[in-house]
Amino acid sequence: MVTHTKEKPFECNICKKTFGLKHSLKLHCMIHTGERLYSCEICGVNFTHNSSLKSHIKTHTGEKPYTCVICESSFVRQRQLQLHILCHTGEKKFTCDICSKMFSRIDNLKNHLAHHSGNKPVHSYTHSGDKPYMCSDCGKTFSRKDRLKEHLVSHNGKRPFECQQCGKSFVRKEHLNYHINSVHARNKK
């Protein structure tokens, strides 16, 4: 009955997030304890949720059943496709109440709000060693969201930063800059 009424009587003691089902709360609590019950038999990466393991296994099989009809990029999860489509539509439905800046994703707004409050989570992760951003394709974790985004490019094979002198391509701009300074600058001497 709780699921039909949208009532959420089960509360996490740690972060106060509420859930409609006791089982959902139990699964959520594993995030705080670090408990990971589901293990990939292929590479040994562990997951809190069975659904995350199932998505991860697709990285080994190469299965990406969700395809963008606009650019034909494909994704392991339907949610990834839904978020990707926002880059084509330009839709930004999340607005910062403080400065009116708009965002296409709620997580980007939350990250932005942390800067207004003086909390800079990226900086604190650097010191704590926490890596809260996980690649859903391979399970690799990152302390910064931008590093995860750069990493995701490695799965689709795109290398957007191309050297104008030799045509070699790179995932990150700083890798291109390093290449230019170490290879081409050295050749000019």
Image (tube, rainbow, N blue to C red):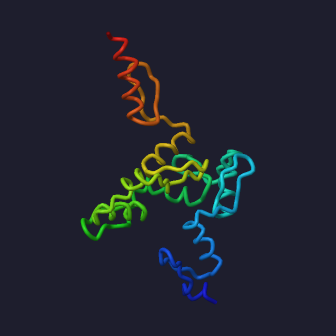
Above or below for 150 versus 56: above
Residue 90: horizontal and vertical position, in percent?
39, 56
Location of residue 56 in the rendering, given as x and y in whole percent from the top left corner: 65, 53
Of residue 93 and residue 121, the one placed in the foreground of this image is 121
Kindly indicate the quadrant of the structure image that contains residue 46: bottom right
Residue 16 drawn above or below residue 130? below
Quadrant containing the C terminus is top left
Q: Residue furthest right?
A: 41
- Residue 2 shown left or right of residue 118 in the figure: right
* Image spot of residue 24 (x, y percent): 62, 75
Front-most of 88 and 139? Answer: 139
**Quadrant where the N terminus lies?**
bottom right
Q: How many marks?
A: 0
Q: Of 114 and 151, which appears nearest the observer?
A: 114
Q: Residue furthest top?
A: 189
Residue placed furthest toward the front: 128
Q: 153 or 29: which is nearer to us?
A: 29
* Residue drawn at point x = 57 percent, y = 48 percent: 140
Relative to 82, say whether 74 is above or below: above
Q: Who's the residue at 36% across and 28% down the image?
A: 177
Place of residue 176 in the rendered image (x, y in percent of width and height, measured from the top left): 40, 29
Q: Residue at x 70, y 60 (%)?
A: 38
